[in-house]
């Protein structure tokens, strides 16, 4: 297939995307917003529940954004990328399982536990992204990154499909009702995430730092290295411009992913329609991510990224006017075609532009901007929904983020020049 120098490490690394995408799909995008609106916060106005969910997503993104560059610098200093990934993963797994224990109406506790799980998920991704330069050669970054996202979509989609089946037919699994099935789906995600993280723990090895130091010293040096990185970025104009562009367009991507189910519920679509659309997105995204990885390798990452941003902007414009279920399915198909590509090519383009010996530090900034961008979009949707009383108004705001991101990306010098 691909001539990787260390195939086992590449596949073990990519399999982590298969593992943690179950959380992104079944919890973050799927069952949590659905269960929050209909079970934990039942009786609350739709615009108010949208506000609280958007605010929680924004707070979680803000916290990990503040921590990301420091954690990345610490990991580079101490050779701690793999261990810190496993630590944040453990936090995500435990808190995801804990959602099973939250009773009906306890919406505040549900949001707190969800916030901790999101921190575990996002924190682990800092080090997962950074490890790509330890397992793949520069010429293979586009394909390796696409492989990770492709496996993530098919793995997350497979477990989500099983959980949807369990929710639709709870009696086949010896469960009382759909609500109990949703609670057990949180347990299934935790188990899936834990089992498929094992290859990462066993086989992936990062490049050793010049000299191994203690966690305390790594922390102290990490803050110092963080300041140095600001100076480095000032001298890397293309990297700095790319990060600004990424900040805006990935904001739109993250907002669509986290708020789509809530938006659909606000428009009156049934849970069955929304779950089916999510499954369609996942399984289309798998081959599409691989195909766009090839396209990026063949034509360059930037033109493929610009095309993907255009598709997202058109999706947001169309979604503000949709009335029928078939419209939601068409939009899900369109998002599936570009969702994997825009994420995987952003990661591989950035990895090609940065110094590999400081990958975790620079990916700390990459993730910091990605998480800061997840603050703006959900907050804007929540506030505009609350002020206008209309979900349709809130989705139009996202288009501006794609326009700014694309404009800045055009100014970035192509990494292949």
Image: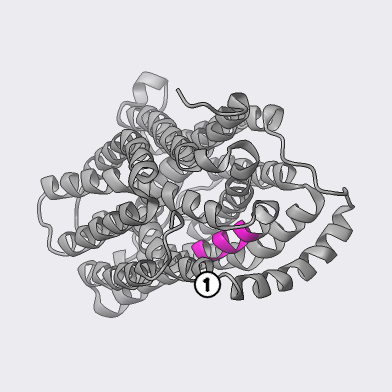
In-image side of 390 versus 83 (left or right)? left
Q: In terms of secondary structure, what is the magenta stretch mainly?
A: helix
Q: Is the residue marked by circle 1 packed among few (<14), some (14-19), or many (20+) residues within 10 Å?
A: few
Q: Quadrant of the C terminus?
A: bottom left
Image point (35%, 42%), residue name:
298
Q: Residue furthest front?
A: 417
Position of residue 108 measured from the top left corner of the image (x, y, whole percent):
52, 61
Image point (74%, 43%), residue name:
83
Residue 55, visible in the rendered structure: no
Q: Which residue is mark 1?
A: 237
Q: Quadrant of the N terminus?
A: top left
Q: Is residue 26 above or below residue 232?
A: above
- Out of 229 and 54, give the one closest to the viewer: 229
- Say what secondary structure mark 1 lies in: helix
Q: How many numbered marks have been drawn onto this rendered protein structure?
A: 1
Position of residue 13 measured from the top left corner of the image (x, y, whole percent):
59, 34
- Out of 174 and 308, give the one closest to the viewer: 308
Q: Is residue 37 magenta?
A: no
Q: Is residue 366 magenta?
A: yes
In-image side of 209 versus 261 (left or right)? right
Magenta-drawn segment = 362-370
Position of residue 54 measured from the top left corner of the image (x, y, whole percent):
42, 65
- The picture quadrant where one finds residue 216 is bottom right
- Out of 112 and 238, give the one closest to the viewer: 238
In-image side of 306 versus 392 (left or right)? right
Q: Residue furthest bottom?
A: 387
């Amino acid at each position: 297939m691909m001539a990787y120098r260390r195939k086992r490490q590449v596949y073990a690394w990519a399999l982590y995307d298969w593992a943690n995408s179950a959380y992104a799909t079944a919890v973050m995008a799927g069952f949590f917003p659905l269960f929050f609106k209909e079970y934990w916060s039942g009786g609350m106005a739709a615009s108010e529940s949208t506000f609280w969910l958007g605010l929680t997503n924004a707070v979680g993104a803000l916290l990990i954004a503040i921590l990301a560059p420091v954690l990345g610098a610490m990991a580079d200093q101490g050779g701690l990328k793999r261990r810190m990934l496993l630590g944040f993963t453990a936090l995500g797994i435990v808190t995801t399982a804990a959602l099973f224990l939250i009773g009906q109406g306890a919406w505040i506790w549900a949001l707190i536990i969800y916030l901790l799980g999101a921190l575990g998920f996002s924190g682990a991704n800092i080090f997962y992204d950074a490890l790509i330069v330890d397992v793949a050669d520069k010429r293979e970054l586009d394909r390796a990154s696409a492989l990770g996202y492709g496996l993530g979509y098919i793995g997350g989609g497979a477990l989500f499909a099983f959980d949807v089946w369990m929710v639709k037919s709870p009696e086949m699994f010896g469960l009382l009702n759909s609500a109990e099935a949703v609670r057990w789906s949180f347990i299934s995600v935790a188990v899936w995430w834990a089992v498929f993280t094992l290859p990462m723990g066993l086989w992936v090895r990062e490049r050793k730092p010049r000299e191994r130091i203690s966690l305390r010293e790594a922390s102290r040096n990490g803050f110092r290295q963080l300041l140095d990185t600001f100076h480095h970025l000032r001298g890397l104009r293309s990297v700095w411009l790319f990060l600004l562009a990424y900040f805006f367009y990935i904001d739109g991507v993250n907002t669509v992913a986290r708020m789509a189910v809530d938006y659909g519920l606000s428009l009156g679509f049934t849970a069955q329609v929304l779950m089916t659309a999510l499954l369609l997105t996942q399984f289309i995204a798998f081959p599409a991510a691989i195909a766009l990885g090839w396209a990026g390798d063949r034509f360059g990452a930037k033109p493929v990224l610009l095309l993907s941003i255009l598709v997202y902007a058109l999706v947001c414009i169309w979604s503000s006017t949709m009335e029928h279920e078939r419209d939601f399915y068409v939009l899900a198909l369109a998002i599936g075609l570009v969702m994997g590509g825009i994420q995987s090519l952003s990661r591989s383009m950035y990895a090609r532009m940065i110094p590999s010996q400081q990958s975790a530090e620079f990916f700390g900034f990459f993730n910091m901007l990605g998480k800061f961008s997840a603050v703006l979009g959900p907050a804007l949707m929540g506030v505009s929904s609350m002020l206008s009383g209309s979900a349709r108004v809130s989705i139009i705001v996202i288009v501006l983020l794609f326009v700014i991101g694309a404009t800045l990306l055009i100014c970035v010098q192509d990494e292949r020049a």
